[in-house]
Amino acid sequence: MTGPKIGIVGAGGIAPSHIEGFQKAGAEVAAIANRSPGKAEALAARYTIPVVCGSLDEMLAKVQGLDAISIVTPNFTHAALAMQALRAGLHVFCEKPPALNAHETEAMCDTAQRAGKILMFNFNNRARPESQAIIDFIQKGGVGKINSAQTQWVRKAGIPGYGSWFTNRKLSGGGAMIDLLHMADLALYFMGYPNPDYVLARTFSNFQHDEEFRSSYGSEESSGVMDVETACHAMVTFRSGQCLTIRTSWAEMNERELASVVFQGAWAGGRIERAYSNGGKDETSIDTCKLFLLDNGKMIEKPLVFGPGPDDLGRRANAANFVQAVRGETRPLNTPAQALRLMKIIDAIYESAETRTAVQVDG
C-alpha cells in the first residue's frame, strides 16, 4: 500500500532519517520546506522530492492533497508549526522535544484531539529492535511491576551548536535534559508511563565555556547565548510507588558517551545500553541488551542479540510507524498524553533545580 502524502518542514541533519523512514514505508514525500533554500534543494535532489518551499505556509498553498507533515526544525518552532498543520487537517510527526515546555505541549495535544488527527513525536529509541523485544517481554508478563529504573545519556564532550538556539534557553527550552530525553522516555515506556508524584533535581553548568567540551554537531555562533545546563541529575517518584533516576550530560567527566536504561521488576530485570564510539579514538559503538531472570531459583542473564544496524535505525522505524498509523494499519508507538507527561516531568526537573526543593508534579 502506498501513501500517505507527506511534506517535510526543515532540512537539518535529522531530516534524511525521516524521509528514508517514510519512503521505505511506502509514503510519498511530496515537498520539503526550509528557510535556507540550498539545503532544501539538496535534499529534494537526493530523495526525488518534487516541490521545494520556503515555509509551511507556502507548502500548504502549493501542494494539493497533503495528508501529513514532518517537523524537523528548532525546538521553539515545534508548537506553532504543529498546531498550524493540525488545524489545516494534517497529521503531524514532530521531532523531539515536543515543545519548549508542558504548556506548549498541552496546547498541541488539545489541538490534535479537536482535529481528530495523529500527533506523534520522534521518541525513536522505542522503535529500535532491542526496545521492542524488551517491551514485548514486559507486556507478556515476564517482568511484573517495574519497581525502579535508572537512565543515563552522558557525553564527555558534546555541547551542540554553541551559541546557537541549542544553548539559548528561550529557544531550546533547556540544555542536556530536554535534548537527551530519549532514555527517560524509554524507561517510562517500559514502566507503563506512570503518573509522576515528586521530582528532586540538580543541574550543573561546568565546562559551558570550555572549547574542549564542544560538539561538532550544530552550527556555532561565537557571540550567541549559553545559558543552559550541561548536566542534570534527577529522581522521580510516582503515585504507583515506582521510582526513576535520570542522569544526562553534554559535558561531564566520562570515559565515553553512553546511553542506557536499567530496570528492576518483581520477576525480572533488564538493561539496554549503547556505548558510543569514543570521540574517534575507536570506531565502534557497542550495544548490549539483556534480561536478568530466575531459572530454577538461580539468577541468570539472557542476552538479546541483534545484528548491526545504522545509528538512525530507530528514527527510520519510528517514521515508518507513523506512516502505518496514518494508514490505519497499526497504533502509534507514542501518544500525545505520554509526551505531555514527559514534559511535565522535565518542567518539574528544571523547577526543582532552580528552587532547590522537591516539586510535586501535576501528572
Image (spheres, rainbow, N blue to C red):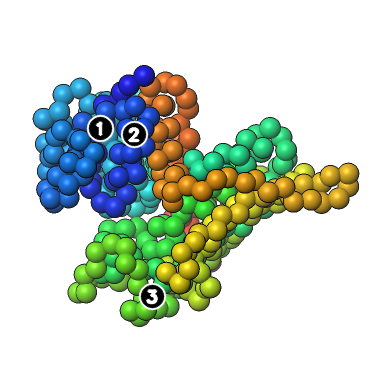
Which residue is the site of mark 1? 29
Amino acid tagged 1: Val
Tell me, for residue 22, which label it has, or none.
Answer: 2
Residue placed under numbered mark 3 in the picture: 213
Q: Is residue 182 above or below residue 211?
A: above
Question: Looking at the picture, which amino acid does disc 3 mark?
Answer: Phe
Instruction: Give the distance between the C-alpha atoms of the residues marked 1 and 2, in whole angstroms.
Output: 7 Å
Q: Is residue 254 visible?
A: yes
Closer to viewer: mark 2 or mark 3: 2
Q: Viewer-proximal residue, 220 or 335?
A: 220
Q: Quadrant of residue 286?
A: bottom right
Q: Residues within 10 Å of mark 1 (few under 14, many from 20)?
A: many
Q: Nearer the viewer, mark 1 or mark 3?
A: 1
How many discs mark residues in the rendered view?
3
Q: Label 3 crowding class (10 Å Cα cut-off): few <14, some 14-19, many 20+?
A: many
Per the model, the C-alpha gap separating discs 1 and 3 is: 37 Å
Q: Do the residues labelled 2 and 3 touch (CB within 8 Å)?
A: no
